């Protein structure tokens, strides 16, 4: 079954709830958009074990905690949101 979503002025779309549930997407989930001709394929982002190992190693060398990384990501995400979509909220 196909779904229709409207593109906002900020270039965002809403992924229908049934699709989000089927794909296991939650708030702050990452997705990958692949362009195939004039079709865009959306799929959940799944890091492989090698990528995760490299990231963990780099992070552990910095001395950052998981909580601190989460805090930084949320702060920067908020800044980016304000810069790219100031009229939305």
Image (cartoon, rainbow, N blue to C red):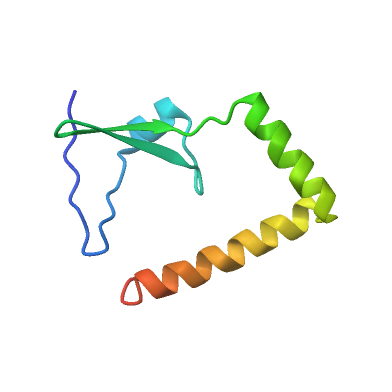
Residue placed most toward the observer, 10 or 22 = 10
Identify the residue at horizontal 17%, vertical 50% (top origin). 6
Identify the residue at horizontal 43%, vertical 28% (top origin). 23
**Which of the 4 image quarters holds residue 34?**
top left
Q: Position of residue 37 (x, y in %)?
A: 16, 31
Q: Is residue 24 positioned above or below 79 on the image?
A: above
Q: Is residue 82 positioned above or below 16 on the image?
A: below
Identify the residue at horizontal 29%, vertical 47% (top origin). 14
**Which of the 4 image quarters holds residue 11?**
bottom left
* On-image quarter of the C terminus: bottom left
Q: Is residue 43 left or right of residue 36?
A: right
Residue placed most toward the observer, 65 or 5 = 65
Q: Is residue 19 positioned above or below 61 on the image?
A: above
Q: How many marks?
A: 0
Q: Is residue 76 positioned above or below 16 on the image?
A: below
Identify the residue at horizontal 31%, vertical 41% (top origin). 15
Q: Is residue 82 left or right of residue 49?
A: left
Q: Position of residue 81 (x, y in %)?
A: 43, 67
* On-image quarter of the N terminus: top left
Q: Position of residue 38 (x, y in %)?
A: 14, 34
Q: Position of residue 47 (x, y in %)?
A: 57, 31
């Amino acid at each position: 079954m196909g779904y229709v979503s409207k593109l906002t002025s900020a270039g965002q779309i809403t992924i229908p709830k049934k699709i989000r549930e089927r794909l296991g997407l939650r708030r702050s989930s990452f997705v990958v958009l692949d362009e195939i001709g004039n079709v865009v394929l959306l799929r959940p982002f799944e890091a492989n074990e090698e990528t995760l190992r490299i990231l963990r190693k780099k992070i552990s060398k910095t001395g950052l905690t998981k909580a601190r990384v989460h805090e930084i990501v949320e702060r920067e995400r908020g800044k980016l949101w304000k810069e790219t979509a100031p009229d939305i909220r």
